[in-house]
């Protein structure tokens, strides 16, 4: 399984993601420079967290114009696997690969903490190793993670099972208290209709070693790897 | 008359002006005067502190670079080294809290990556006035947001620090920022010019009019007109910093440069003259080539600007194209603005004319050094009149404990550190809140521990003892996670050194620190002095902040403060004494800032550190926590709060001292351990061998916190209820809705 981690100016979780894939999961992994037009033949593209272009205009709003995004959009449209984490999720929204938008967190503060998310759909390539309704402990670190979608899009997301993760309590309850950033219907991650593009605010690469507190993030990366094996 | 005004504006004395004339053999022009005023400011020259700082030990087998460079460098084995430093950004943070704090982070990051190291951790030591005052809340909100916005964006985790509140910081908040980086031993860079003919390359952001006179501003007291100084505060651009960091590390990694210097305080002036002075060369630059953000800037403005996110590189001319290619990849300018010469002078050209021509040695190294008069404050003896018999014993110790744990000095700081990305780079093993922050080093079995510490009130009551305790407590924090100290950096925050009482405090604190450093065999690798922390003549309490860094080897994970298992024994190492002077208990319950601070026996302290490190190394203990502000009762409560399962405890002590002193006294050299019963024998043998007094004081049990003295129940609280108060009190004050 070949992974590509995109480096935008201002990406700062690029190396963390690379480390998990390369050093912990022993997968061939490459950095993809945003100015290139080359996906280096990877099977899965990851847009990592960070502050692309400083997030000065709107999170992800400038990165979507990076040259490499043309190839990424084409790759996604052909069914290639694309995972956007945090800022990567924001970029996917700006690029139109996913629907909806991000607002500032409800308390208007940056939030860095380990939270719980519930797997709402374990049928897509990114979650197939998770049990239905499994609760994952994964850190978040963002200012603009308050997901919003207008009613018609929300209906569509629900109808097509595109809501992949929801913020929940440690026991898996979905309530307002667990909804740390104020996202509509506690949404923490969504996919496109065909399930090959996933955007999520929590950072699975930060939950990949027991020493750092949680290994639950590995479920997502292992799902991708096993999905690839299953189709070969 | 005009000259006097000019000198006042530049914060130079008549004596200093005359010295400039004799050094350069003529009267300086305005630009040259500006250059001297910056480099001879207290902030850049350390003219009042130098003779005292010489007392600090700075060498050791592990030290690769002591004070004098952008940051100290320490060997950690396996061809790796760490680079760390602490700096203050107090004055700008008072005038413009968000940008002041943000640019403080930016500046210390550049100090670290200038050495070739990738920054891997930030810590902050913050001091504010009481949060009951809305202005103080606003300052704190601004400072925390500024640190958060800058550090998060650059992608360097803020992994710890400390925050204290005291009325003396109301008009003078302290923002001390610490950064640590990791570097391959063979790839450390310094501010060096190499040989004449080398190119001087300007990289990073364009120069604007911001921050002119920042360093001189930081070298004077504030008056009621302080608001007018807002334009002197620089504005930070963390995105630019991130690009600069990546580009600089790339050219250093490829060995394309000879030397590098950050344009921090004193901007182009400081970087050009220091690089030349350190190599005994001259430097010639052409200001017309300097990338500028605004039109019509004068040489004076260009040389004195403190625009952020700029660096000066020195390279052989043949490497310039390759360097420019790398910077272009990161969309950054890299412009050759001059060259290294053999003139030993700084020569600056502007529109074809030479506008500056001064010897670099005079600018950098010949500032007068002052041995300023010092005198014990008049009220010093009065401060120590404290009659314990006049203090009524509290009737309800439960309430006292709750007041202490809800006090902002002790309450959980999650409201702050939740705003910091403390996990990026995926190395953070102990999250903020532990005795010390701990990071693993990828690709090795080592951990780095770091902590910031300093108790201003102790220093106010007895500066020498306070200085010793600051070092002792920082090292004790390291010992509690199992780390052996490697070195310390310090940020010394004081009032106006021209006042003999302040100078006395400074001299005493440094003497105390020096004694403790020698005792613990921990060298000082550098630091920063921040004087003139006064507004309208009211100084802050003397506040040295110690940043200590230690190494953990041979462990699969560090020790943490929370209780781990029901039934574990609770052990107190160290002795209880009847000491209440300088305690938070006296401040909160009696409104008293009096008495002698706790005594410190450096020998007992040293033995305790060695014992703790060894006990942890042998896997004998489950948890360890330092006893500090709030005393034994607060330390035990924190062990419960930081326990994943929120275990309670039952302890009983037989000491025949006042119960309030037993509970809340801040006697030094004490650590609370918890351990499995089967490890007690080995633990006790080790304690005997290391000559550390220990006693079993109780055990981890249930969901209540029970504290007895000779069978009398003093405290009985439910862990969960107390935990909620401790956890939420800061949030309630700062985000009530």
Image (cartoon, coloured by chain):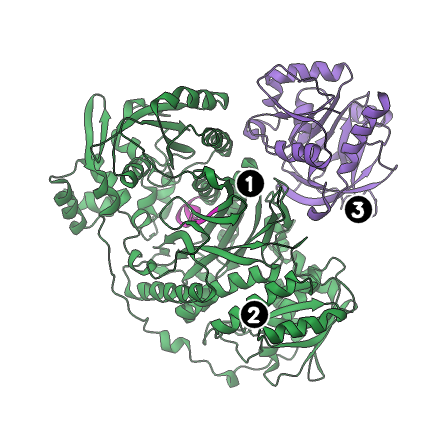
Chain colours: A purple, B green
Label 3 sits on a secondary structure element that is loop
Q: CA distance from mark 3 to mark 1?
A: 29 Å
Letter of the chain that mark 1 sits on in the rendering: B
Residue B84 part of the magenta segment: yes
Q: Which residue is mark 1?
A: B156
Letter of the chain that mark 2 sits on in the rendering: B
Number of the label disc, if any, that sits on residue B608: 2
Give coordinates of residue B495: x percent, y percent: 35, 59
Mark 3 surroundings: few (<14), some (14-19) or many (≥20) residues within 10 A: some
**Which of the pair B453/B629 is nearer the observer?**
B453
Question: In which quadrant of the rendered view does residue B654 lie?
Answer: bottom right
Q: Is residue A231 left or right of residue A86?
A: right
Give coordinates of residue B372: x percent, y percent: 25, 61
Mark 2 surroundings: few (<14), some (14-19) or many (≥20) residues within 10 A: many
Q: Do tags 3 and 1 sit on the same chain?
A: no
Q: Which residue is mark 3?
A: A169
2 or 1: tag closer to the N-terminus: 1
Number of the label disc, if any, that sits on residue B211: none
Indicate which label's residue lies in the foreground, 3 or 1.
Answer: 1
Marks 3/1 in contact by CB < 8 Å: the verdict is no
Residues shaded magenta: B83-96
Q: Is residue A75 above or below residue B62?
A: above
């Amino acid at each position: 399984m070949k992974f590509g981690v995109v480096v935008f100016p201002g990406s700062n979780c690029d190396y963390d993601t690379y480390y998990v894939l390369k050093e912990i999961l022993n997968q061939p992994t490459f950095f993809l420079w945003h100015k290139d037009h080359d996906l280096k033949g990877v099977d899965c593209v990851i847009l990592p967290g960070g502050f692309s272009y400083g997030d000065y205009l709107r999170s992800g709003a400038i990165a979507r114009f990076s040259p490499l995004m043309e190839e990424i959009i084409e790759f996604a449209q052909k069914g290639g696997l694309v995972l956007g984490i945090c800022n990567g999720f924001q970029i996917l929204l700006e690029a139109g690969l996913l629907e909806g938008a991000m607002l500032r967190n409800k308390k208007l503060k940056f939030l860095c903490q380990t939270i719980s998310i519930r797997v709402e759909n374990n049928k897509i390539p990114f979650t197939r190793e998770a049990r239905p309704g499994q609760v994952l402990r994964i850190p978040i670190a963002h200012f603009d993670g308050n997901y919003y979608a207008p009613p018609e899009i929300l209906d569509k997301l629900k109808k097509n099972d595109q809501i992949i993760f929801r913020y929940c309590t440690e026991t898996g309850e979905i309530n307002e208290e667990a909804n740390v950033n104020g996202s509509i219907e506690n949404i923490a991650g969504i996919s496109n209709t065909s399930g090959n593009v996933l955007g999520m605010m929590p950072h699975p690469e930060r939950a990949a070693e027991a020493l750092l507190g949680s290994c639950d993030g590995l479920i997502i990366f292992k799902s991708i790897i096993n999905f690839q094996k299953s189709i070969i | 008359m005009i000259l006097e005004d000019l000198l006042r504006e530049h914060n130079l004395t008549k004596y200093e002006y005359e010295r400039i004339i004799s050094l350069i053999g003529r009267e300086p022009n305005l630009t040259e005067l500006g250059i001297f005023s910056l480099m001879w400011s207290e902030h850049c020259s350390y003219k009042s502190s130098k003779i005292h700082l010489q007392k600090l030990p700075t060498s050791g087998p592990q030290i690769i670079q002591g004070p004098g460079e952008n940051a100290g460098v320490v060997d950690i084995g396996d061809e790796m080294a760490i680079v760390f430093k602490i700096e203050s950004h107090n004055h700008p943070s008072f005038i413009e809290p968000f940008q002041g704090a943000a640019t403080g982070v930016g500046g210390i990051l550049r100090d670290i990556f200038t050495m070739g190291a990738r920054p891997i951790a930030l810590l902050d030591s913050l001091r504010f006035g009481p949060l009951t005052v809305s202005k103080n809340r606003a300052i704190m909100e601004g400072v925390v947001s500024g640190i958060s916005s800058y550090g998060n964006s650059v992608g360097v985790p803020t992994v710890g620090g400390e925050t204290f509140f005291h009325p003396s910081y109301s008009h003078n908040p302290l923002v001390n920022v610490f950064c640590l980086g990791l570097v391959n031993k063979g790839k450390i860079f310094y501010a060096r010019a190499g040989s004449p003919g080398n190119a001087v390359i300007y990289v990073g952001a364009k120069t604007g009019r911001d921050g002119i006179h920042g360093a001189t501003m930081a070298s004077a007291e504030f008056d009621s007109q302080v608001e007018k100084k807002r334009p002197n505060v620089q504005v930070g651009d963390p995105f630019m910093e991130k690009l600069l960091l990546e580009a600089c590390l790339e050219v250093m990694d490829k060995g394309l440069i000879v030397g590098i210097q950050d344009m921090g305080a004193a901007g182009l002036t400081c970087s050009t003259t220091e690089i030349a002075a350190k190599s005994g060369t001259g430097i010639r630059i052409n200001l017309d080539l300097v990338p500028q953000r605004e039109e019509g800037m004068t040489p004076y403005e260009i040389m004195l600007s403190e625009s952020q996110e700029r660096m000066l590189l020195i390279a052989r001319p043949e490497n310039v194209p390759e360097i420019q290619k790398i910077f272009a990849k990161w969309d950054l300018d890299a412009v050759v603005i001059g060259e290294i010469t053999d003139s030993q002078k700084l020569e600056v050209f502007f529109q074809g004319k030479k506008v500056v021509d001064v010897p670099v040695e005079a600018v950098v190294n010949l500032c007068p050094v002052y041995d300023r008069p010092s005198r014990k404050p008049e009220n010093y003896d009065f401060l120590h009149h404290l009659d314990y018999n006049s203090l009524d014993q509290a009737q309800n110790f439960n309430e006292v404990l709750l007041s202490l744990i809800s006090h902002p000095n002790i309450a959980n700081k999650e409201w702050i550190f939740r705003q910091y990305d403390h996990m990026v780079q995926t190395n953070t093993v102990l999250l903020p809140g532990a005795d010390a922050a701990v990071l693993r080093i990828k690709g090795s079995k080592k951990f780095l521990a770091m902590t910031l510490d300093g108790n201003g009130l102790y220093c106010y009551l007895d500066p020498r003892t306070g200085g010793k305790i600051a070092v002792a407590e920082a090292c004790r924090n390291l010992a509690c996670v199992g780390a052996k100290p490697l070195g310390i950096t310090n940020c010394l925050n004081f009032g106006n050194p021209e006042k003999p009482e302040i100078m006395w405090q400074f001299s005493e604190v440094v003497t105390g620190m020096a004694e403790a450093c020698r005792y613990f065999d921990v060298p000082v690798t550098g630091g920063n002095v921040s004087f003139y922390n006064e507004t309208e003549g009211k100084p802050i309490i003397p506040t040295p902040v110690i940043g200590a860094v230690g190494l953990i080897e041979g462990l699969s994970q560090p020790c943490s403060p929370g209780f781990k298992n029901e039934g574990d024994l609770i052990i107190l190492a160290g002795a209880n004494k009847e000491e209440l002077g300088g305690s938070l208990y006296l401040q909160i319950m009696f409104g008293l800032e009096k008495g002698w601070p706790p005594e410190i026996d450096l020998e007992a302290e040293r033995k305790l550190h060695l014992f703790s490190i060894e006990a942890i190394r042998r896997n004998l203990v489950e948890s360890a926590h330092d006893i500090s502000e709030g005393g034994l009762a607060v330390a035990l409560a924190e062990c419960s709060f930081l326990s994943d399962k929120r275990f309670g405890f039952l302890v009983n002590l037989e000491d025949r001292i006042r119960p309030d002193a037993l509970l809340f006294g801040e006697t030094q050299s004490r650590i609370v351990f918890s351990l499995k019963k089967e490890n007690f024998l080995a633990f006790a043998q080790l304690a005997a061998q290391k000559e550390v007094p220990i006693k079993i004081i109780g055990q981890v049990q249930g969901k209540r916190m029970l504290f007895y003295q000779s069978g009398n129940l003093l405290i009985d609280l439910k862990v969960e209820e107390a935990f909620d108060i401790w956890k939420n009190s800061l949030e309630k004050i700062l985000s009530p809705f």
